Image: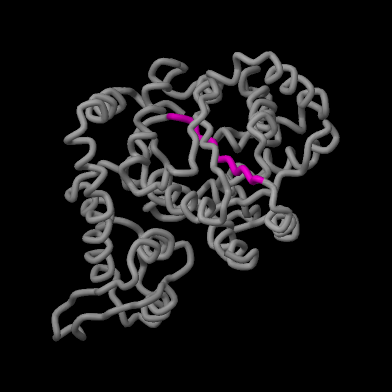
Amino acid sequence: MTTEEKLNLVREVGEEIITEEDIKKLYDSGEPLVAYDGFEPSGQIHIAQGVLRAININKMTKTGVKFKMWVADWHAWANNKMGGDLDKIQTTGKYFIEVWKACGMDLTNVEFIWASELVKDHNYWKLVLQIAKTNSLKRFIRTAEIMGREESMDLTAAQIIYPCMQVADIFMLGANITQLGMDQRKVNMLAREIGEQLGYWKPVVVSHHMLMGLGTPATETEDKTKRTIELKMSKSKPDSSIFMTDTREDIQRKITKAWCPEGVITENPILEYCKYLLFEKYDTMVIERPEKFGGNLTFHSYAELEKTFAEKQLHPMDLKATVIKMLDEILQPVRKHFEENEEAKKLLQAVQSYQVTR
């Protein structure tokens, strides 16, 4: 694979890449490359964390990158997820890994690393303190959105140290590339700012698109990152997300009532599902409808679908019917895994019994 072919795959993943020139140099260097993504185990995993993450990681590993998946159990603990119960957080982390096994993530070049293991190394905490000394408290508070929090002096001391830990993760893992969502942009940029200052490097930041929730979009804001966070699906609003073990009935209920105005192509969650999930999994999309309504439509690309929808030649309910069918097919192997694998079944039952906290 040529450098340009590798870059094209990274461009498919990254809504923003800082910088393309930096990642090109990495590929041209021939040195071993490590990318990382981290996740707080919290609640049931939704389709953006499951399927979309698998799609993105598979593209990155195809370029020769080794991927380190950071199970941020201590970070979730610091952020008071799952009521601050570390045992529940770790059970949820194991459940997440089972989902990825079942939904098509190529694990050949993926390594799962638990924060609870790395924090035993005193060098980790030495680096956390070095990072904490580089900037004022105000600078770290400005990264609060990485935890799903508002910028506020009401953050706990644990939440204040959280971004210092996340920056330390990058360098302790030896990651040349950070590949997280747009909501993590601020802390990744902080790592670029202070990496060389501390004797490390400037990691390349590949920020992937955040899949929208299924509800009506909130009032617009000019800040692109904040807008992304406002729109993304939320576990605290179960009907705004498709979860990885949702039944056909769950999918049908959620998609049927999802926001999808006729002819509207901006901030339309159903079209987002088509672009970022369905056309990644399928080469074509066939909309079945009676002859009296124009007969079946076949699309070979998202661009074709978007154009037809914008021209109001495709009704939202016809599109939704096909989306329901295709999503159900994608999630069937995951449901089967959690039905037939006893360990996976126990993990899911435990997670479903937990109360999700922000």
x and y, in percent, of residue 261 in the image: 36, 67
What span is in magenta? 32-41
Residue 38 within the segment the image draws in magenta: yes
Residue 118 position by quadrant? top right
Q: Depth check: give the residue in front, 2 or 10.
A: 2
Residue projecting furthest to the right: 197
Q: Is residue 42 above or below residue 336?
A: above
Query: Left or right: where does residue 76 sit relative to residue 107?
Result: right
Q: Residue at x 57, y 33 (%)?
A: 147
Residue sitting at 23 percent across and 56 percent down? Answer: 329
Say if 21 sits above or below 186 in the image: below
Dividing the picture into quarters, in which one does residue 357 lie?
top left
- Quadrant for the N terminus, please: bottom right
Front residue (pair 93, 289): 93
- Tell me where residue 182 appears, x and y as whole percent: 59, 49
User: Dominant secondary structure of the magenta stretch?
Assistant: strand
Q: Residue at x 17, y 49 (%)?
A: 249
Residue at image coords 45%, 16%: 86
Look at the picture and state if 92 lies above or below 5.
Answer: above
Location of residue 145 in the rendering, given as x and y in whole percent from the top left corner: 60, 37
